[in-house]
Amino acid sequence: MPTHIKTILEAAIRAPSGENVQPWHFTVQGTIIDVHIPAEKGASLYGWGERASYVAVGAALENMRIAAAASGWSAQIDLLPDIHARHAARITLVEGSDGYGDGLFSHIAARVTNRKPYDGKLLTPEDIAALRTASSGGHYGSVRFIESRDAIKKIAEVGSGNERIMLGNRLLHSFFFSHVNWTKAEDDARMTGFYIDTLELPAPARIGFKFISTWSRAQWLNRILRFNRVVAAGNAQLYGSASLMGIISAPQESPQSALEIGMLVERLWLTATARGLALQPLTGVLYFMLRLRAGETDGFSEDDRRLIAEYESSIRDTFQLTTDDTPYFMFRIGHAPPVSARSSRFPLERVSTYIS
């Protein structure tokens, strides 16, 4: 495999994905790179219509375009050339850099989800200007930020609604804990899911987390202590330590919208990384919203559905979204200590095919 192709693909597989499922396969032939979403990678309760996978692949495409420019090439991206074949994109490489993403390539490997407490200090005007510039750099979709403490507190509570619903819903509970790797050895072996250390849990909480990984125990604690609400309240306080919160939305809902939003997500995240800022996605509730908007209510209790409707109302009101706007990515940004660990990734040879 030529060096520049390897550099581009190594950048692609550093993109973020929900539950760290890494929903992509790359087929290289000459100067053409085809990106597919494998069928077995799209099954996520948080990914109605595989939208979470499309967002992740969009982030990978952004990395590829940046890496191509850094390697002396330009990447021409054709989205969804054949959606029925799970064909997310075709990249045609043209010799000669277009200078895309100048300065961001070195931050691809450094980008990471930081779940630690943030210090809540205001961002500098330069930081905010850089984030706004990244958000308006010719990408499809729009980014809205909130900085007031009242608004941040409100959205922090909405973001923690994911944990309230997940810990009280048997299907979602089972799905989440099936993706938790409890040891480094397990994480290295599976190379997908959450390594427990990346969740940044204090020692007592980590013990409790292991205890509630069994549904019968979680159900018992929810019944006698409303445990899922206790966890959500604690996480709302954590999320509220952000300096800024934001949401990225599209004017219409479609697989292509999700891909293009994913590209915008990654450019914003890399810009934050370059500025020394921490970022954590808070997207769970958004995908619950998508599922219910599509009329798919199976798996959600009446109380779940009521909460999701309340969360959607809060999101639309706080970020001033119209009824047509489809939010795909919500996040918090701020200053935080370095992460304690990173989750493992599939090696390039496992997610790529090179045809010489």
Image (cartoon, rainbow, N blue to C red):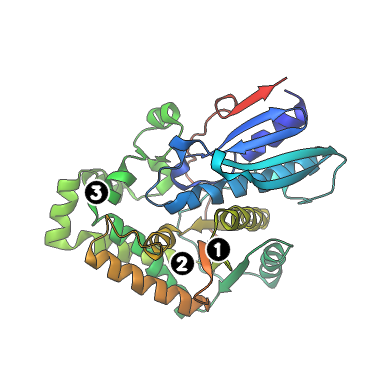
Asked whether the viewer can see residue 110, the reply is: no
Q: Amino acid at mark 1?
A: Gly
Asked whether the viewer can see residue 18, the reply is: yes
Would you say 79 lies left or right of 3 here?
left
Give the mark, 3 or 2, whose residue is nearer the N terminus: 3
Q: Amino acid at mark 2?
A: Ser
Q: CA distance from mark 3 to mark 2?
A: 23 Å
Q: Which mark is residue 208?
A: 3
Would you say 268 lies left or right of 307 here?
right
> Which residue is disc 2 drawn over?
241
Q: Mark 2: which secondary structure?
A: loop
- Badges 2 and 1: C-beta atoms under 8 Å apart? yes
Question: In the displayed image of the protein, which residue is found farthest to the top?
Answer: 356
- Residue 72: which quarter of the image? top right
- Residue 180: which quarter of the image? top left
- Residue 83: which quarter of the image? top right
Q: CA distance from mark 2 to mark 1?
A: 8 Å
> Which residue is disc 1 drawn over?
334
Does residue 294 lie above or below 65 as drawn?
A: below
Mark 3 neighbour class, 10 Å CA radius: few under 14, some 14 to 19, many 20 or more = few
Give the mark, 2 or 1, whose residue is nearer the N terminus: 2
Does residue 219 lie above or below 191 as drawn?
A: below
Q: Which mark is residue 355?
A: none
Give the mark, 1 or 3, whose residue is nearer the N terminus: 3
